[in-house]
Image: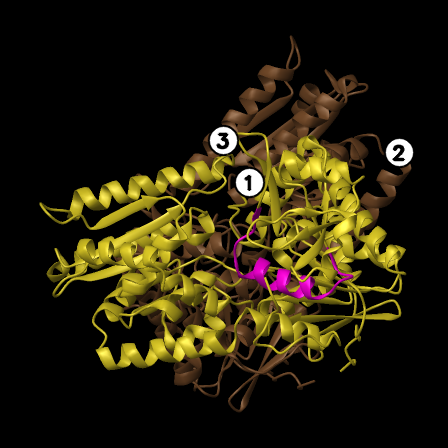
Chain colours: A yellow, B brown
Amino acid sequence: MTPPPRATGLPMVLLSHRGPVSFERDAAGARTASRGAGGLVTALTGLVSDLPDAVWVCAAGSEEDAAVAAEHGGRAVRVSLDAEPRVLGDEDDGAAEGTPSMRLRLVEVEGHAHDDFYTVIANPLLWFLQHGMYGLALAPQLTKREHAAWDDGYVAVNRQFADAVVEEVKAAGGRALVMLHDYHFYLVGRRVREQCPDALVSFFLHIPWPGPDAWRVLPPPWREAILHGLLGNDVVAFHTEGFARNFLLSVQELLGLPVDLEAMTVRVGDRTVAARHYPISIDVAAIRELAATPEVAEHAAALTEAFGGEGRQLVLRVDRTDPSKNIVRGFEAFATLLEDHPELAGKVRFLALLQPSRQDVPEYADYLAEIGGAVARINAAHGREGWEPVDLRLGDDLALAVAAYSVCDVLMVNALADGMNLVAKESVVVNRRDGVLALSENTGAHQELGAFAVTLYPFDIQQQADALHAALTMGRDLRRARREAAARVVEENDIAKWLHAQLTDLGVTPGPASDPGPG
Amino acid sequence: MTPPPRATGLPMVLLSHRGPVSFERDAAGARTASRGAGGLVTALTGLVSDLPDAVWVCAAGSEEDAAVAAEHGGRAVRVSLDAEPRVLGDEDDGAAEGTPSMRLRLVEVEGHAHDDFYTVIANPLLWFLQHGMYGLALAPQLTKREHAAWDDGYVAVNRQFADAVVEEVKAAGGRALVMLHDYHFYLVGRRVREQCPDALVSFFLHIPWPGPDAWRVLPPPWREAILHGLLGNDVVAFHTEGFARNFLLSVQELLGLPVDLEAMTVRVGDRTVAARHYPISIDVAAIRELAATPEVAEHAAALTEAFGGEGRQLVLRVDRTDPSKNIVRGFEAFATLLEDHPELAGKVRFLALLQPSRQDVPEYADYLAEIGGAVARINAAHGREGWEPVDLRLGDDLALAVAAYSVCDVLMVNALADGMNLVAKESVVVNRRDGVLALSENTGAHQELGAFAVTLYPFDIQQQADALHAALTMGRDLRRARREAAARVVEENDIAKWLHAQLTDLGVTPGPASDPGPG
């Protein structure tokens, strides 16, 4: 096994599409700023704010982001990380102040190029491909439009971000630890390597990496650019070993390069690139803090009122309305459950908290309509006075979701394919009813939590119905033992550990695993 | 590398769903019989009719087949193989007669079980899965219906055929070479192995075998039954090395068995199962004989009249209307070609000879409608007085197809996925205009013929349009050199060689490779 590259003491340059802070103008015309949510942003913010010479490169996602970038000539700005983030001037150089702060470089991308990059190539083309969602008979169709979007969008935008990263690395003296994130930026690693041969470059993918067959949907110039782009990194990291192996098999089959499936490496010229896996996780303390707020308690009381009571049970799902989440088959499985077990009528309800997603993409709009249709059919077929089997709520309310996690009897996660699935991890650490996790085998989370879950096979509606029944009738002791075991796994493998493991392998010596730093 | 098992001198038992002879009743009520067409049936018929103690097991495909089977108590019957095949009585035991004959066992399957086996599971479920044609968001949906079709159809029918094979092996003394064919019979090998431990069992798959991800569409009991069923064979053979490797990777990932990707074997208990590949081919002499008939000459003259002439060129495709053949994108590519190259207007036409296929399956009926829609759109958009760009002819006329092969300038094969694709091989040995083969990288045939073809990337319409243009404007010398080289490859690797290579590996000593025997 090749010894891991060492990054001890190197300045850090981070790249992700969405950044940790976003600026707006309020009604009075004043600049406001908000912090990004989610465990990943929190963990990486903590990391970067620890390091005075670190910089986070991301897309300017709003007009005001672009204005901030323009005011500083496109260079990085220092941003305070208190409750109301603000751009710090040169006079109040943050590190000295005591307030946590970080350097942020907002990259403004021309509108058409960004559309091509984001709404033609990255979503839906790469997303669909990597989640196995093309019925290949008629879609995708790669025409002049898609070729132009590849050249003038994906390739051009990757080059622009790569150049921003390169500038930051060069400003740091040419040696830096570069951490690139996700499928938006497959091409960046190679360009950074070419311009900054002394940088240590790692890449993390947050979605599935399918086997070589799937990549043949892309013409050779695209798929080879993606693979060679990734091979510009020193480390290419995934959520699961299976994804990492699929990556090496893709390199072997589509590029003909020699891979070592034992060492999980590939030789590229005189370099060795490692495929690794680090299952991402959640900030356990933060979600438990949220679970303890009065707002969540209020939601939980209302949910218990609506769904609880003697002999009544609640099946829950919390998802974006993405076809990869397999929401329609989940409802069909619930309908099958009610057909097979008429004794459950009036006793079990299904609450679906769904966040509408990417409604500008036709496949997503169609899928939302399929969801609505399935719910209507099931409620019409099975409902009766005083009992509506499925309660579908569209929206995005984390406090409500956490309250629902805490009071549900079964959490259903039946995704077709999912890099990790953090809903599963969140629910097991805040649930208070010894709820059963019903978890698709095709989620990254199933590697860690499958042993304590009822496994779902996402294309098999009958099996999912049977599994829901098994979950609803499971004895209390077994439910408790499994939920506690699952919670322990998540507690011991939280977001801080995910980051710590990567940094340790890269030779960085971060703080203790349990403390991702302020932020 | 494990030495190959030896089958020298063993009696042979062959299994395929469709057999080499089918019986009917004519209007006068007399029994008639017809020989199956195609190189595979011809080659295997030649093999089996050489061997007096060989037997071919197949499904009774007609009422009259079932009547023949019933008259003989379900046992094998000896059938003469002259132009008018007939069942030979015990008194005229064929082998002694001089007329070639073979033993045939027609297995009658109860109608509902056969429907479940054939029209619910094998087609479309396995076919769609293995050709990557499910857009997984909504299809397939495995419900009670599919579970019943698996249990009472696929599993039951496989058991019935396995038992017929076992009877034949036992009748031959328990030692035999068993050759099983195709995706209808994944479960047979294991049952034969259990009942007949001394048999040497080989399996050949005629369609693609995708990687492990694809098989996760099936619930574990199904996919494990399929894999364990195949591991009952001594040899599992495919058209390409890629399919063989995908099979071993599937066994490794889904069953956790130790595979050796160098030796291309897997250990199953104390046995070693080999994954091999033998690219199937055509009967070159037979298709050239057909090409030399007056019927073909007449068709060729009519086609030349319709499509030929100074400065005119013909693009041809010959396919079943199966979504895997990618017919709609082929038309879209032709339309793009006409848009990009207005100078071709009036000069180039596209002749599509399409055989309607599986119109009882909704996806196939829909696909045929998409084909008709695409042709109408293109002819409306690009046609003009005296020039209709696309000529779509639905039907099944081998003589017409061979005539079209002989006079076309470009043969387009742009399949999404195709185990081999024999159209490509047929066309290069009968074409008389130094026609260019435009061939999808996702066909088995591309392994052998890709070097002499213009490669098509089946999802990329623009690339296919550009490739058609390159083919139509290629210099005559290069066209000739490539077509001749491709024809030589097919001549040297015909159906007889395909069979010979397998038998040699199995230790059977067949006749010379160039002579597949009578039939």
- Reading the image, the residue beneath label 3 is B370
Give whichever of B371, A26 is nearer the camera: A26
- On the same chain, marks 3 and 1? The answer is no
Separation of residues labelled 3 and 1 (CA atoms): 13 Å
In primary-sequence order, the first of circles 3 and 2 is 3
Question: Furthest residue to the bottom?
Answer: B270
**Is residue A469 among the parts visible in the rendering?**
yes
Was residue A44 drawn as part of the magenta stretch in this picture?
Answer: yes
Asked whether B291 or A349 is in front, the reply is: A349
What is the distance, in whole Å, between disc 3 and disc 2 at their CAs? 35 Å
Spatial separation of the CA atoms under disc 1 and disc 2: 34 Å
Q: Which residue is mark 2?
A: B475
The residue carrying pointer 3 sits among few (fewer than 14), some (14 to 19) or many (20 or more) residues within 10 Å by Cα, namely some
Chain letter, disc 1 residue: A
Position of residue A381 measured from the top left corner of the image (x, y, whole percent): 17, 45
Q: Residue at x 58, y 36 (%)?
A: B327
Residue with the mark numbered 1: A139
Label 2 amino acid?
Answer: Gly
- The chain that hosts pointer 2 is B
- The residue at the far left in this view is A385
On screen, residue A112 above or below A453:
above
Mark in front: 3 vs 1:
1
The quarter of the image holding the N terminus of chain A is bottom right
Q: Is residue A94 magenta?
A: no
Circles 3 and 2, Cβ within 8 Å, touching? The answer is no
Magenta segment boundaries in residue numbering: A34-55
The amino acid sitting under disc 3 is Glu
Q: Please tell me how crowded label 2 is: few (under 14), some (14-19), or many (20+) other residues with Cα within 10 Å.
A: few
| SS state under label 2 | loop
